[in-house]
């Protein structure tokens, strides 16, 4: 499917910093509950992420990630996921997070 550049600009992808990560045992597939700070304009949002293969909760705190911040919230089990944390599958299909190569200001928009 082809989209226009205007369509792409509608997707609001921002950088945030994970402030808290907890196991999400109620999820159907192994996942973590994440709290991500996107800076003063957007604030802290919650997300559910199936990233348990490559990451431990304690190693996620302080890590910058990219997320879509303008999708409607989605109920995932007992968690209301407010943003979609972005990643790509490795060779076995397990998610690897997408992040800036170096620290950047929170809330910075991908364009």
Image: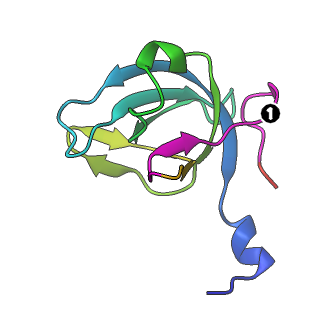
Query: Splitting the image into 4 quarters, where does residue 4 fall?
Result: bottom right
Asked whether residue 93 is drawn in magenta, I would say yes
Please provide percent x and percent y for residue 96. Answer: 55, 42
Asked whether residue 101 is drawn in magenta, I would say yes
Please provide percent x and percent y for residue 39. Answer: 68, 27
Judge by depth and name the residue closer to the eye, 58 or 71: 58
Residue furthest to the front in view is 91
Please provide percent x and percent y for residue 92. Answer: 45, 51
Identify the residue at image location x=82%, y=27%. Answer: 102
Which quarter of the figure is the N terminus placed in? bottom right
Q: Main secondary structure of the magenta part?
A: loop
Instruction: Answer left or right for 4 relative to 28.
Output: right
The structure's colour scheme is rainbow
For the residue carrying disc 1, how many other residues have a C-alpha within 10 Å: few (<14), some (14-19), or many (20+)?
Answer: few
Judge by depth and name the residue closer to the eye, 4 or 58: 58
User: How many labels, in total?
Assistant: 1
Q: Which residues are magenta?
A: 92-109
Which quarter of the figure is the C terminus placed in? bottom right
- Up-down relation of residue 65 to residue 55 (above or below): below
Identify the residue at image location x=50%, y=57%. Answer: 71
- Up-down relation of residue 2 to residue 86 (above or below): below
Q: Mark 1 = which residue?
A: 101
Instruction: Answer left or right for 111 relative to 77.
Output: right
Instruction: Answer left or right for 88 relative to 9.
Output: left
Query: Splitting the image into 4 quarters, where does residue 8 fall?
Result: bottom right
């Amino acid at each position: 499917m082809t989209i226009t550049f205007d369509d792409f600009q509608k997707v609001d992808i921002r950088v945030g910093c994970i402030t808290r990560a907890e196991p999400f045992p109620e999820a159907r597939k192994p996942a973590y509950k994440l709290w991500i700070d996107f800076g003063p304009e957007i604030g802290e949002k919650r997300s559910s992420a199936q990233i348990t293969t490559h990451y431990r909760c304690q190693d996620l705190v302080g890590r910058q990630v990219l997320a879509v911040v303008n999708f409607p919230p989605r109920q995932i089990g007992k968690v209301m996921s407010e943003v979609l944390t972005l990643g790509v599958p490795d060779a076995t299909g397990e998610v690897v997070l997408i992040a800036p190569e170096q620290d950047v200001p929170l809330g910075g928009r991908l364009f």
